[in-house]
Amino acid sequence: MRWAENEEKGWCEKHIEAYVNIAGPVLGVPKAVSACMSGEMRDTAELGSMAALMTERWMPRNVRANLFRSWGSLIGMLPVGGPNIWGNTTWAPDDTPAMAERNETHGCFFARKEGPYNRTWSFAQVKEAFSARSASDWADWIVAKISLKQRREHRQKFLDRDIEPMTIDDAMSAMLEVSGKQFKKNVELYGAVHTDELSETGAKQWPEKEFLNPLKDPLPDAPNMRIYCMYGVGAPAERSYHYQHVDDTMQLANEDKQQAKRNAGREDMRWKVNVRVHDPEIGLERGVRTSDGDGTVPLVSTGLMCHKGWRTKRLNPANIPIVSREYVHQPSTVFKDLRGGPLASTHVESLGNVNLMADVVKVAAGVGHTLKDDIHSRIPEIAAHINCFDDDTC
């Protein structure tokens, strides 16, 4: 829209009645970083041992990483806003009370464990492990210890004692460092997010480049236009990651040894999502921590601009009416509908949500003005923690 306004002032006011953003990742998607970093995301981390083996044989991590880095869409979906939006190593706006009690935060975008795991366990470590497990888990734990190749996931507190917290800026810098010159050039040309000398949290210097960043470029001068944000909530979405980093790919846990030998000279393949870290109580499963969202895009990205950013004078100088509509994910059983049924609200299945489609029809029929905000998530609380929209520090 801003590009159209740049070509012909008043074009949006003249030609656009309403803009409906359905599950749009306005501020980016965390999984774009992990995909471009090491060819991984929750989909690959949650694969079972046999499925993971077949995946590595047919389409290994290095091939996936190269493929993902060639997709312009992923460059466009790299998270924008830096620590002011996504948090730092001690805080994030969407941290839950349970995480606060455990001194955990989504702002630690990458929790990096350096080096291989220690294969020896002291009596004190074994005693601690047993004390933290129920009796029903003891047998599985002993079997896993006997067979190192079939090691099961373990609780975070005994596996990752020495981790390095990395903010979104740190993670982006690491990704750009290992992803090659061409990818870095593509990010500079086509991405809204930059790090270090590319200026992650700063705006690009020429106006055309600001069109890519909703935190820098205001909405068009079209006071009679209306904007509707419709997205699902209640389905955990990827938010941050635990990574293992080693000097030798042969030291990576659960890595295919033949593939590790092939990747020996690649710095990017020395990074791998640490699937051993597992703590469902704080939304951490197989190295991937989740937060509220639509199963793919976290709430910070789908809801924050609609609820607060685009309601500020700096980013909405024409005072365009903004309406946020949330749809709670209420899937039916797979025996009734493989896609989740009429009330599913995950990222793709939301297009079949009857309530969302009814609202779209109202907008298309010219009665969208009857729709009001319908909020079911913690987005008001999350938005209250972010104060950088008015002063242009996001």
Image (spheres, rainbow, N blue to C red):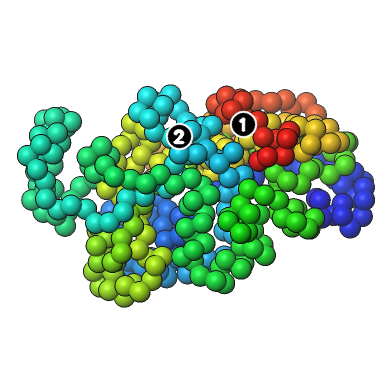
Quadrant containing the C terminus in the rendered view: top right
In the displayed structure image, the side of residue 293 where residue 303 appears, left or right: right
Q: Secondary structure at mark 1?
A: loop
Residue sitting nearer the eye, 128 or 273: 128
Residue flagged by tag 2: what amino acid is it? Thr
Can I make out residue 331 in this image?
no
Q: Please give left or right for residue 18 compared with residue 47 in the image.
A: right
Residue 54 image point, x, y percent? 30, 65
Residue 90 circle label: 2
Q: Residue at 41% x, 37% y: name it.
A: 333
Instruction: Specify whether 27 is left or right of 144.
Output: right
**Mark 2 and mark 1 in contact (Cβ < 8 Å)?**
no
Q: Position of residue 228 (x, y in %)?
A: 72, 36
Q: Position of residue 326 (x, y in %)?
A: 61, 31
Disc 1: which residue: 386
Residue 308, quarter of the rendered image? top right
Q: Can you see residue 328?
A: yes
Residue drawn at the location 86% of the way across and 36% of the way down: 318
- Judged left or right of residue 392, residue 124 is left
* Distance from the alpha carbon under mark 1 to that under mark 2: 15 Å
Amino acid carrying mark 1 in the image: Ile
Q: Quadrant of residue 90?
A: top left
User: The residue tagged with tag 2: helix, strand or loop?
Assistant: loop
Farthest residue toward the front?
Answer: 197
- Which image quadrant is residue 127 in? top left
Residue 182 against residue 8 in the figure, above or below = below
Decide: few, some or many residues near mark 2? Use Cα within 10 Å; few <14, some 14-19, many ≥20.
some
Above or below for 295 versus 324: below
The nearer-to-camera label among 1 and 2 is: 2
